[in-house]
Image: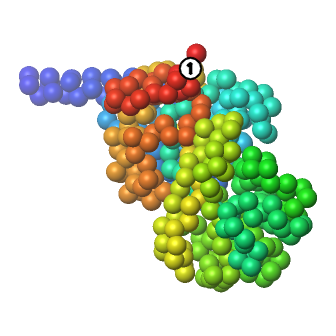
Amino acid sequence: MSRFVLIAFFCLSLVHCGERQSEQRTYVLSTGTTGGTFYPVGVALSTLVSAAENADFSLTAISSAGSMENIKLLRDDQAQFALILGIFGAWAYDGSGPILNPQENLRSVSAMWPNVEHFVLKTELVKTGTVSDLNNLDGERYSIGMRNSGAEFTGFYIFDALGIDWTEELSIAYMGYGPSANALQDGNIVGMNVPAGPPVTAITRAYALLGEGMTILDFTKEEIDSLNYEFPLWESYELSPGTYPTQKETINTVASPNILIVREDVPETIVYEMTKMLWDNLATLQEIHSATNSMSVESALSGVSVPLHLGALRYYEEQGITIPAHLRAE
């Protein structure tokens, strides 16, 4: 009799699990190219969800061209979660910059790791050591990044915010990070814009080739304030000595967050669960990818401009995190 009961219980459990799995919705997390950081971190997040017991949803990470495409995928409901550069979130929600129509269905989950600006200039052209030196180049060739890349859009945004007349002072070259480092060493450009999580391979290589012949420019407090005239995204970021070969002094640059965003119509319980999984398993995520080492729940809202999803808002309120007014959806 007991054997019959055990078999019956096992069968009922299988039926229940099958019903639960069939009831689960699979959400899509859009990331970036497979060679970047968004994709492996996105896969790690989807793995955390898969490994979680009693999760009410599943998550599939897909590759994409990056932030701009991710905004489109969210708009069309082909993805429900996405990793994007913080400035793209601000542009999308506001309907500004390269994104003309406001995407008011977007909500934030969390800031992730910082996107650190590296504005490089040949040392022979450095006068003040700050990014304002780019305003005195008299038509020299400068690499802004690849066309339609995050580097291009954020680079021009920074130039415009600081009053750097790049149309007159610079001859813009469109190159990826590796080719930019080669061109700098060969003398085909005088500098390059490389926003990424340090240490960046292209910057390390450039330092190894040029040593003290290149400089990563500092940002002053006044310049950082100028960057934040429209969106409160940018914060001071120190590159400590030894981050790169031959680097002896601290470099005071800036960083803005990469953020995890979600469609507003994803249920509150799902986003709450996703937010909780992210922070409960941060140590595991950090073991999977070092880019996440700088993440902490205390800085989860730093530089975020898109209002929080109600599920994420509930989680942070439970953790005693102060919620800025602009992150509460009206």
Write down the quadrant of residue 75 in the picture. top right
Q: Residue at x 64, y 23 (%)?
A: 105
Q: Residue at x 48, y 72 (%)?
A: 241
The one nearer the camera, 302 or 182, is 302
Quadrant that contains the N terminus: top left
* In the image: residue 89, left or right of residue 249: right
Quadrant that contains the C terminus: top right
Q: Is residue 8 above or below residue 128?
A: above
- Residue labelled with disc 1: 329
Write down the quadrant of residue 246 in the picture. bottom right
Q: Is residue 257 above or below residue 215?
A: above
* In the image: residue 69, left or right of residue 204: right
**What residue type is disc 1 on?**
Ala
Instruction: Using the rendered image of the protein, determine whether residue 281 is visible from the camera's viewpoint.
Output: yes
The one nearer the camera, 292 or 119, is 119
**Where is residue 287 shown, x and y percent of the image?**
38, 57
Q: Is residue 99 above or below residue 128?
A: above
